[in-house]
Amino acid sequence: MTDDDEAPLSGEDRHRAETLLYDHFKFLTTLSLLALGGVLTLSQSGQIEPMTVRQVLLVLAPISIGGACALSGATGIVAARHAGKEPRQRQLGLYRRVSVLGIGIGTGGFLALFMDALR
């Protein structure tokens, strides 16, 4: 790494990075909604051994938390810009990490339960 990699972003580059992060949050919000719909549909399809309510809730909770964090991140960017301020980078970084982690854990948990139910 060079010192150039750690230099602060210029105004236009910062705007591009912020726009990219906003689009990423929108994508994660949509992905969480699709994952929630898929989990609910497949868990009630009747073609596999039914999952218990506890199992479904253990899968839905992290996906929901991930989606809520993604929506909060996008809202944080919009609210800060509307107020003429800079978005809080630490907060956005936390939202980004938690949203990806939640969606990943929930989807992975569902796949593990779903594959086990197919046996």
Image (cartoon, helix red, strand yellow):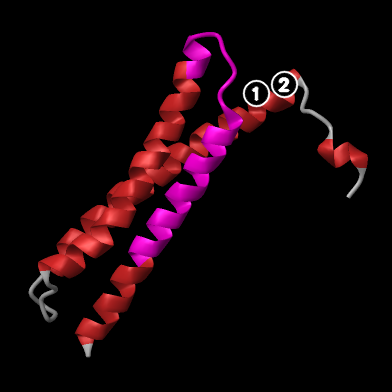
Q: Is residue 65 magenta?
A: no
Q: Which residue was labeled with disc 2?
A: 12
The amino acid beneath tag 2 is Glu
Residue 16 lies, in percent from the top left, at 65, 28
Image coordinates of residue 45 in percent, x first then y, are 11, 69
Where disc 2 sits, the SS reads: helix
Front-most of 26 and 102? Answer: 102
Q: Which mark is residue 15?
A: 1
Label 2 environment density (alpha carbons within 10 Å; few <14, some 14–19, many ≥20): few
Residue 77 in the figure: left or right of residue 42: right
Q: Position of residue 91 (x, y in %)?
A: 52, 34
Q: Is residue 100 left or right of residue 47?
A: right
Q: Name the residue: 25% across, 54% down.
A: 36
Q: Which residues are magenta?
A: 80-107
Residue 32 seen in render = yes
| Residue contact between numbered discs 2 and 1, judged by CB atoms under 8 Å | yes
Q: Residue furthest right?
A: 2
